[in-house]
Amino acid sequence: MPLATYRKKRDFKRTPEPRGAAGKSRGKLRFVIQKHAATRLHYDFRLELDGVLRSWAVPKGPSLDPGEKRLAVEVEDHPLEYGGFEGIIPKGQYGGGSVLLWDRGTWTPIGDPKAGLRKGHLAFELHGEKLRGGFDLIRMRSEGDRANWLLVKQKDAHAKPERSGSIVEERPESVASGKRIEEIGAAGRAKVWESNRDIAVSARARRAPAARAKAPRSARAADAAGPDQIPGARRAAMPRKAAPQLATLVKQAPEGDDWLHEIKYDGYRTLCRVERGRARMITRSGQDWTARFAEIAEAVADLPSKQALLDGEVAVVLPDGSTSFQALQNQLRQDGRGTLAYFVFDLLYLEGFDLTGAPLEKRKEALQRLTAGAPGGIVRYSDHIVGRGERFHAEACRRGLEGIISKRSGSRYVPGRSSAWLKAKCASRQEFVIGGYTEPQGSRAGLGALLLGTLENGDGLRYRGRVGTGFSRETLADLRRRLQPLETDRSPFAPPAPHPRSAHWVRPRLVAEVAFGSWTDDGLLRHPSFVALREDKSPRDVVRESPAGSARGTGARKEARKRVPPARRRPPDTPTRRPPPVRDPGTPKAPVEDPQPKPRKRPVREPLDQKVALPGPALTNPDRVLFPEQGLTKAALAQYLHVVAPFLIEHAAERPLMLLRCPHGRGRCFYQKHPSGTVPPALGSVRIKEKAGTGSYLLLRDEAGLMTLAQMGVLEIHLWGARADQLERPDRVVFDFDPHPGTPWKDVVLGARRLREKLLELDLESFVKTTGGKGLHVAVPTRRGPDWDDVNDFSGALASAMVREAPERFTTHLSKARRGTRTFIDTLRNRRGATWVAPYSPRARSGAPVSMPLPWDELTTATRPEAFTVARVLRERGERRADAWKKITSARQTVTASVIRSALAAAGK
């Protein structure tokens, strides 16, 4: 009997595992991997063969790294039905614990699988939802037929080094239910397999009525003053549903003795319903979370009441006494610290009486009596103070708490938001609906940023900005998994939101809690940071929380706004003296014209009245004028970089940088290629061998890095033609058309177009952009294969071919004296260590021009390169939606040896 061992180990009257029978394999062979939290956490790897699931226990789980050899202990065969099992094996049974369906799919043996198992080497391919590609199972020596094996990933396109993240850590969720192993365990406590009954009828809760019957009457706190004695209480049936009362956000806590003040807990708002010895935990949005808060439900069920409806907050109490929402989420995943507690602050119903019409103080008195004997600190009464609201609020903030809740004494319990409950926070924080997300940049995985919104007056979802910080690697992967099924082609925002090219729109179903510094004048977030997903809140309830003003006594009045001018101090990025520029063959030409430009009499503080919410920390000295003629400030530079960020980063990310810094404005600039001191957190770095040793270069990775460059006063961004991961294999070949001052523009255009024709003759596509001056750059993307000598030989030969064809118009002489009035075709940009100005980079020149990519059909003799400026882009932002160089990153072409020979032949070499 192939399943005899499997059946002998299990009592199928107690375990929900399938008894099963050996079947017959039909069609494609299936595989399954089950995450199993038994005595020790491990992964059960199962392959269908001969009508059963051949099985191995893998303690550390599978790996995508071919260098990782994972122990796989062969265990008994399992029935095919076991491949769909997810749930709880009761304690006391073989393998007791939680079982999660971690991966599933089909597998293809390489060669004869039976022979492979006999010989001790089974090679196969997996086609799963998480695992793909080739694997090997290799039996270790002298261990018998059922023995220890090694599970090893083969080197193929699906392999991934472990240092970039473990697949079992990045993808812990079930492929069947989306749950984590902790949630399976919580559900198991709530739904015991033998009885399929709620947690509320746990042994402890079932014993509670008898225990209470034996208790002396004095111990039953609820009897000390029955609900019929509470003024305002009325006899009524317990409501089937109840909506919680909500607090209105204010800037300051109210003063006066007619206000009660409680601590604001940082957790999940939860109503707890007690009936017939059972307790159910209901979130603010109406979700039943009894299984998640099983321990709390047991404790509330043991309170001395047959019927009650409590209101409170589930939170985790840290060792210092504070509560933390992040700690609560960690606790739910069973990997956090602290004590899970239910802070109860109101009582809506008790023993057949509706208390919502009773005064607040009387409801709290009854609640305190009800919870007086609660053991273990799980259910905690939320006490209060009377009056002294501002002092209480200040003390809460000093202790690092989230804020306070102020409640008008004598008030009734009214569902929904009202002025009887007020909340004063210590920092700005609220919920937002997720309307989209962006692709990650650089080494980041999962997603780049969340696009956020709030519902406003029935007008739909209004864009409130994006948040790209505050995520862990696990959170990023979890968010991507949750958001992908919600993707849609249409933006949920109304009016449409400004968005990067990599934006993915999603149906507005998920709610995120976000901390932020403040609001901009046009209602966007400043310096947001992700806190957590709020599964307990509905998107329909998410609106912008604007402080209603400070409440004093029985009324409220608006607080006058005060604007404090920024401190006049030297920014941290400003050097004490300007270092001399260092030139090498690849250093861009320094902007020497107008070294002391005269400022306009009336500088423009914010050009064109732009209102753009910028990521990252606030700029120091945002009003410092960097382009005196136009009155363009550091803030304007940051706004421009924000507008072009999706395009600029696409072309500049992960390339060593050469920066032209002008911290005090154009005309006082210096080049910097090595970081001085510590690398800013938002920028990366790479070590590169140079003639004089090894130097460190800065790398750009995301928009936060661009904002750092703006803070540093960087007016020009210059790039290597290779990326940091393969410095010796360039992927851009650049031709710089540098005309004589007297050369007509049409000759420059015709020269660039002629070069394009020559490149097309070699089956090479090219792209053009203005340089920010009088010239043009023609860029040729290439697969990373040729080295620097190859691209230098190729570009030099093609430039020589242009000179050979029209020697009166073009030259390759470096000396200006020998150029005459001809256009210099500069190919020095294609040497190791040389740089070229980045697409969309500003230039430190009069007029604040930019290096603007153009479609070839827009490059005409009527094109005016000086027309592309920072101010124009800011004025017309949103109109130019497409990146003219979009296809450059997907071009599949290379500079082969035959291409180089053809170029050399054209040059007569």
Image (tube, rainbow, N blue to C red):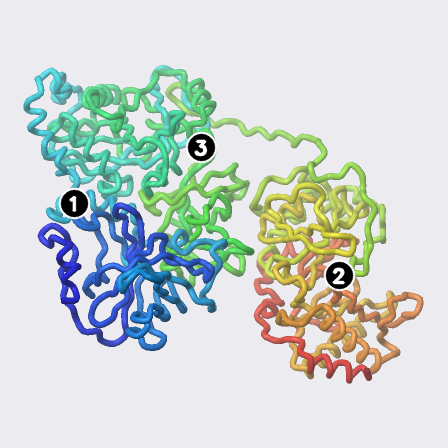
Percent coordinates x, y for residue 762 in the rendering: 68, 82
In the displayed structure, does residue 741 sit left or right of residue 844? right
Q: Foreground mark, 3 or 1?
A: 1
- Quadrant of the rendering where the N terminus is positioned: bottom left
Q: Residue at x 30, y 63 (%)?
A: 104
* Residue 818, position as x, y percentages in the image: 92, 69
User: Which secondary structure, mark 1?
Assistant: loop
In the picture, the quarter occupied by the C terminus is bottom right
User: SS of the residue at dot 2?
Assistant: loop
Q: What residue sits right under mark 1 in the picture?
A: 92
Q: CA distance from mark 3 to mark 1?
A: 56 Å
Task: Report how far apart the C-alphas of labels 1 and 2 lie in the structure.
Answer: 70 Å
- Verify CB contact (< 8 Å) between mark 1 and mark 2: no
- Check the image and name the residue furthest to the front: 142
User: Which residue was labeled with disc 3?
Assistant: 547
Q: Is the residue 543 above or below the residue 502 in the image?
A: above
Query: In the image shown, does 681 or 352 lie closer to the viewer?
Result: 681
**CA gap, disc 2 and disc 3:** 54 Å
Label annotation for residue 834: 2
Among all residues in the image, which is located at the extreme right? 817
N-terminal of the pair, mark 3 or mark 1, is: 1
Q: Quadrant of residue 391?
A: top left
